[in-house]
Image (tube, coloured by chain):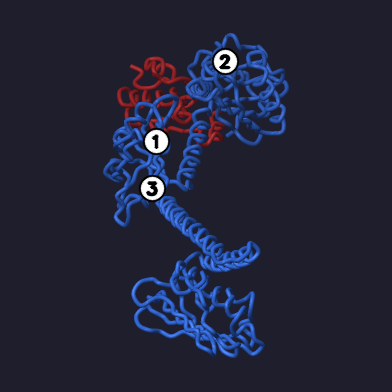
Chain colours: A red, B blue
Amino acid sequence: MNKPKELTLYVAGQTPKSVAAIRNLEKICAEHLDSSYVVKVVDLKENPRLAREHNIVAIPTLVRQLPVPIQKIIGDLSDTEKVLVHLQLGDPA
Amino acid sequence: MDEAVPDTLSLEELRRRLVEAEDTLRAIREGDADAVVVRNANEDTVFALSGGQESYRAIMEAMDIGAIALDDQGRVLYANAAFCALIGCAATQLQHLPIFEKLDANSAQVVRETIEQARHGRHQVQFVQSHRGSNRHLMVTAAPLPMAFGTGCALTFSDVTARVEAAALEESERIGEAVIASANEAVVVCDRAGNIIKANAAASALMPGEAIGRHFTDALPLAFAEDGGISTSDGLLDLAAAGSAARGVEAFAFHPDARKDLLVSVAPLRVSGETIGGSVITLVDLSERKAFEKRQTLMMHELDHRVKNTLAMVLSICGRTLAGSDSLEEFRLRFTRRIQALAATHSLLADASWAGIDLAALIETELAPYVSAAGPHLAVSKLERTVAPDVAIAFGLVVHELATNAVKYGALSAENGKVTVSGATLNGNLYEVVWAESGGPPVTPPIRQGFGQTLITRSLARGEGTGATVDFAPDGVVCRMVLPIEVET
């Protein structure tokens, strides 16, 4: 039985890096992640208070909530390798 | 879950947070993040980092309104491209310098006052600035600009010259329209091709149908006086097209109702500067004046005729009175009275504008020096008939002669004497007036026929049936006069 896997991407409206991060995350999910990942996108422009849950300061930030420990990466996620390694995503093999 | 204020933190947790903070700072510094969340006690706010300010700057640089930010000393912190273009100065030449040094004295004064006014809120002023030999209209708007140290000022400058000039032009056109519409004279404005582009009400009254768009020569065919220098309407338009003007050229229009005498003037229509955009033609309707002049000329001829006739009559009266007088004193008396009789008839005719007078009025006027119409010595009846001026003059003189005879020798020389004057229609326009004396001394016919009697019998002859006869009857003189009267139509 697979452990739950949860990713949350924090963006701020349509800033260039927010848009790029969403696009890059979709690409990573499609190419490297299986369907066990639950992915959420939170727009802090609409509700800044949601930043408090993961103590978000810089935008965009991708948070891997589960499995613990929590991991974060700031930026537009254009470096796929860095994202996969940093958040320990995908198949470790 | 809020991680900000836990009671105690493990060393590992502290290390994790430090790494995270350093990572955040690095990301911001290196441009990995383009927005940050700033946490306050009550609310959290998202700020765009890069791009936002650049966007604002890009907007400021792109807009065609001049914009500057000044510090509290009036020194330029920022000036956009439009402002630099407006004052003809590079942004680097403005940086940190007082703005007033870059403006002319008048503009500097206006800007200084606007900034002063803006201390209490946004303030806007429009002013005129000399610029490269001409004037331009600028609108300056100032608003307070809160800064870290003190309050600066944000200013925008708009060149509203085109708008002001357009408004002035519109106003000028409106006034022009009103002037043309209010003019008593007919005013027609034509384009370069001679087609009518404007015509006021007086002009439209001269031209049947819609005039706008038609060629002037078709809309209002004119015939010009031979000695006017202009012989056709095209000649009139050509004159204006060549930049010349003509005044008071006499012409007449073939109006459907009646021929219209006109006084025509033409001038080139100068649209801007020396460019000729067409012609302005003014037409004064002379019909009434011409009719008046015609009446006046006729009256002058009539007056001339009457004066000559009167002088001839005076000369005749003078000669015949002199021939019949035994002394100069007698001549003076008789001549004066005859001329007075003539003058009395003239006065009546003048009052009636020489349109003919009533026989009864004439009798009363001529007899007034001798007898009252209301008294017992005179009875007048059926004399309310109008006679022409020449008949009136002759009749007046005849009545004068009859009256002087009656006073000297006839009914009016006696206390109970009476003169009865009555009228009766004969036929057509002939009217019989009978002068009958009664109650006077016995009448004896005169031995010789004097001027008075000649005048009585001859002067009323106006064709067949007219004239006068005198009967020296013993009971009183009876004079029958047959006159042509004015038949009422």
- Secondary structure beneath label 2: helix
Assess disc 1: are there few (<14), some (14-19) or many (≥20) residues with their C-alpha within 10 Å of its C-alpha.
many
| Residue A71 location (% of width, % of height) | 48, 23
| Figure quadrant of the N terminus of chain B | top right
Is tag 2's residue or tag 3's residue first in the polypeptide sequence?
Answer: 2
Camera sees residue B9:
yes
Left or right, B107 with respect to B29, comes to right
Q: CA distance from mark 2 to mark 1?
A: 89 Å
**Chain letter behind tag 2:** B
In this picture, is B381 found above or below B254?
below
A87 or B98: nearer the eye? B98
| Residue B158 location (% of width, % of height) | 55, 27
Both on one chain, marks 1 and 3?
yes
Most extreme residue toward the left is B218
A51 or B369: nearer the eye? B369
Image marks 2 and 3: residues in contact by CB distance under 8 Å: no
| Figure quadrant of the C terminus of chain B | bottom left
- Secondary structure beneath label 3: helix
**Chain letter behind tag 3:** B
| Residue A43 location (% of width, % of height) | 47, 33
Image marks 1 and 3: residues in contact by CB distance under 8 Å: no
In this picture, is B433 found above or below B345?
below
**Residue position marked by numbered label 2 in the rendering:** B22
